[in-house]
Amino acid sequence: MGDQGRSGPPERQVGFADQSARQPGSLLSRHRDPGAGEALNAGSRVPCLRDGLPCPSKASSEACNAFPQAPVRGLRTCFAVLSLAALLSCTPSRHVPSLTIAINSGVEGDALKSAAREWAALRAVPVELVELPYTSLFEKLLLDLTSRTGAYDVVMIDDPWFPRLAGNGNLLPLDQTPDPDFLESCLDVCREPYRTGPYYALPYVGNSQLYFYRGDLFKKHLLPAPRTWQDVLDAARKIGSAEGMFGYVMRAAPGNAAVTDFMALFWAFGAEMFSPDSAPTVASAEGAEALRFMLELGKYTPPGYAGFNADEVAAHLLQSSGVMSINWPSWISAMDDPAKSKIVGKIEFTAMPSAKRPGVASLGAWLLAIPRASRHAELAREFIVWATDAKQMRAAALLGNPPTRRSVFLDEDLRKRYRAFPAQLASLETARPRPRTALWNEIENAFGVYLSQANAGKLGAAQAMEKANREISAILERAK
């Protein structure tokens, strides 16, 4: 991307070692855990920051090494940008402040990696990124925050995890009220309790579901944009059959994937997860009807979709084998990238379809927070405020990151570049978060298992919802 919206680096900087061009002796180190396909020896350490300029002694080498590490699941990347004076004054007594940031290894983390590079250069502070797959990230964060290990200084949190991770004082509260330029839906999920409590995070990725559809094919077959779920089903049949494509593509892998795609249907058909007194109600008539409709859509979805996640859904659209899907704005830039897409300019975006109720999207914002046990809390606070300010969020938007600030969505130059911005803003303004409970991960996993089994043909709709309802009741009972 260009330099617009970003500050230039300070003077007297040693060059930043780019991740894509690491050479022996560079200041950047990448490690993958065994689960990611590369072995990592126990007790592995990144090279001394003076790699290529040997430290005069073992003691000074250890002092210079700002990033001791134990094996982790995922990808660990170290950015170290030091002034020349700092680089040459490596002594046993010198303490080098640094930041360790835990991020999601998916597309949602791409802009944050770029921001970390720039901040490391601007502040001459080493930054270590620990990239972890979605499920592993939650597990690592839960362990670090509840055990107060201090492994991370900044953590990237999916908003449904927030009630669990923010509990018991695990995160440091913000020292001031966030800028009202942030969208209200994104700020609300940064508070614990939801909407009313103190702020413990700032929103970085403004993910809110959009409905993706092939505008060119709808025009070809003289169909308006889908406004209802019945419109979706009718178009999936007509266009899919006429074009030899899959009319609808959805993800229904067990757990988060199945629930994420299902909630738009579930809410539109009038169903709710819980009653006003917090009893599970997924087995309602409305819930079963929503699942039956999902199974009907499954007839027009690629084989094996009961194992799909977001990547597989996006791939079918990118390769022009699918007509419609629900997905996240993080995928929009790929749709219009000729290097990745066969459908450049052909995908349109609209709100979630309606049924008995108006359609509503699931909110999926990613938040930046500071663990209470952070060893560099003030630096961490400086970083998250900097990374989420309007100037940096504009720069992140140029990398495809969905903003969380209204001013960025209303930026005229960006609106000319990103045709989905109006739809994204409208979706975020009405998006609905997943239930705000510390038990959501367990509930979602259980619910998603039964939804996936139904989509795989192992359970009927009513049977799946009844089993899910009983399992959710058991989870709530165990937590008492």
Image (cartoon, rainbow, N blue to C red):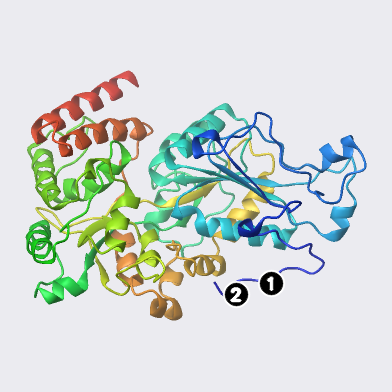
Residues under numbered marks 1 and 2 in contact, where contact means CB atoms less than 8 Å apart: yes
Q: Quadrant of the C terminus?
A: top left
Q: In this rendering, would 68 be left or right of 273? A: right
Instruction: Identify the residue at horizontal 30%, vertical 43% (top origin).
Output: 257
Secondary structure under the numbered disc 1 in the rendered image: loop
- Residue designated by label 1: 8
The image position of residue 352, as x and y in percent, is 21, 59
Q: In this rendering, would 31 be left or right of 475? A: right
Q: Nearer the viewer, residue 340 or 162?
A: 340
The kind of residue tagged 2 is Asp
Q: Quadrant of residue 59?
A: top right
The image position of residue 285, as x and y in percent, is 7, 38
Whether residue 102 appears in this view of the structure is yes
The image position of residue 146, as x and y in percent, is 53, 29
The kind of residue tagged 1 is Gly
- Residue designated by label 2: 3
With respect to residue 423, does 34 lie above or below? above
The image position of residue 79, as x and y in percent, is 68, 52
Q: Nearer the viewer, residue 459 or 229?
A: 459
Q: Quadrant of residue 171?
A: top right
Q: Which mark is residue 341?
A: none
Q: Quadrant of residue 182?
A: bottom left
Binning the other alpha carbons within 10 Å of mark 2 as few (below 14), some (14 to 19) or many (20 upward) gives few
With respect to residue 468, does 297 lie above or below? below
Instruction: Identify the residue at horizontal 43%, vertical 54% (top origin).
Output: 187
Binning the other alpha carbons within 10 Å of mark 1 as few (below 14), some (14 to 19) or many (20 upward) gives few
Q: Nearer the viewer, residue 91 or 441?
A: 91
Q: Residue furthest right?
A: 56
Instruction: Identify the residue at horizontal 40%, vertical 66% (top origin).
Output: 333
